[in-house]
Amino acid sequence: MSTASSKDNPLPTEIGQALLALARQSIAKQLGSGKAEELPAETAERLKDPRLQEQRGTFVTLHKQGSLRGCIGSLTADEPIIESIKQNAVNAAFRDPRFPPLTQEELPSTHIEVSLLSEPQPLIHQEAREIVDNLQRSQPGVILKQGARQATFLPQVWSQLPKAEDFLDHLALKAGLPQTAWREGTAELLTYDVQSFEES
């Protein structure tokens, strides 16, 4: 398991492991195969940690053989972490419009990652170069908003798009905007940190 730190009240690794087990169980239950085993007592006890009742944005990401297989999350802190993880695990597996629903046969080879988000903060900027320099240094999660359109990339996406200009161009396209939208000063940018846990 690997962990990316968050500056906002990080959880210990054992709690992250419990959240991963919960995400996997939630998907198995939704498959309705009858094979969704009860969580071990120790894991169930860890999920009672009061910190998991805090409201935080979360994402659940699925990979299969190194390729993305689903990713759904919530940017707003409008429900407890534990409920958000359960819901986003099911949504990532079955409701990501980019992929067909996950099958029972795929689940054993599916790799799960959960991310807990800090509160997004507006990025105050004057020029495109300042945006690039700021983001290149810190490599946070980024939300791009313009009108009714919005998209986000988790910090993990920096490993695929290491140049800030490319990162922001692709983010604008994901939002359904011209790739230059972030340069024009009409789009709002917000950043956030994550604490992520992934299965071995």
Image: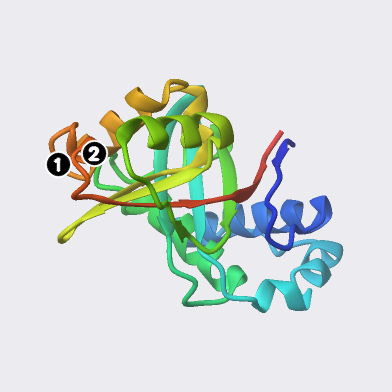
SS for callout 2 = helix
Which residue is pictured at 74% across the width and 69% down the height? 47
Counting residues from the start of the chain, the first of labels 1 and 2 encountered is: 2
Which residue is pictured at 41% across the width and 27% down the height? 164
Is the residue 172 above or below the residue 158 in the image? Answer: below
Q: For this rendering, which residue is in front, 111 or 35? A: 111
Number of labels in the image equals: 2
Identify the residue position indicated by label 1 in the image: 177
Question: What kind of residue is marked 1?
Answer: Leu
Query: Which quarter of the rendered picture does the C terminus lie within?
Result: top right
- In the rendered image, which quarter is residue 76 located in? bottom left
Question: What kind of residue is marked 2?
Answer: Ala
- Distance in Å between CA atoms under marks 1 and 2: 5 Å
Q: Where is residue 33 in the image (x, y as percent from the top left)?
A: 49, 55
SS for callout 1 = loop
Is the residue 106 above or below the residue 66 in the image? Answer: below
Which residue is pictured at 47% across the width and 42% down the height? 154
Q: Where is residue 169 in the image (x, y as percent from the top left)?
A: 27, 30
Left/right of residue 161 with respect to residue 139 in the rendered view: left
Residue 32 in view here: no
Identify the residue position indicated by label 2 in the image: 172
Q: For this rendering, which residue is in front, 58 or 194? A: 194
Query: Which quarter of the rendered picture does the N terminus lie within?
Result: top right
Q: Do residues under tags 1 and 2 come within 8 Å of each other at their CB atoms?
A: yes
Q: Residues within 10 Å of mark 2 (few under 14, many from 20)?
A: many
Residue 83 in view here: yes
Q: How crowded is mark 1: few (under 14 residues within 10 Å), some or many (20 or more)?
A: many
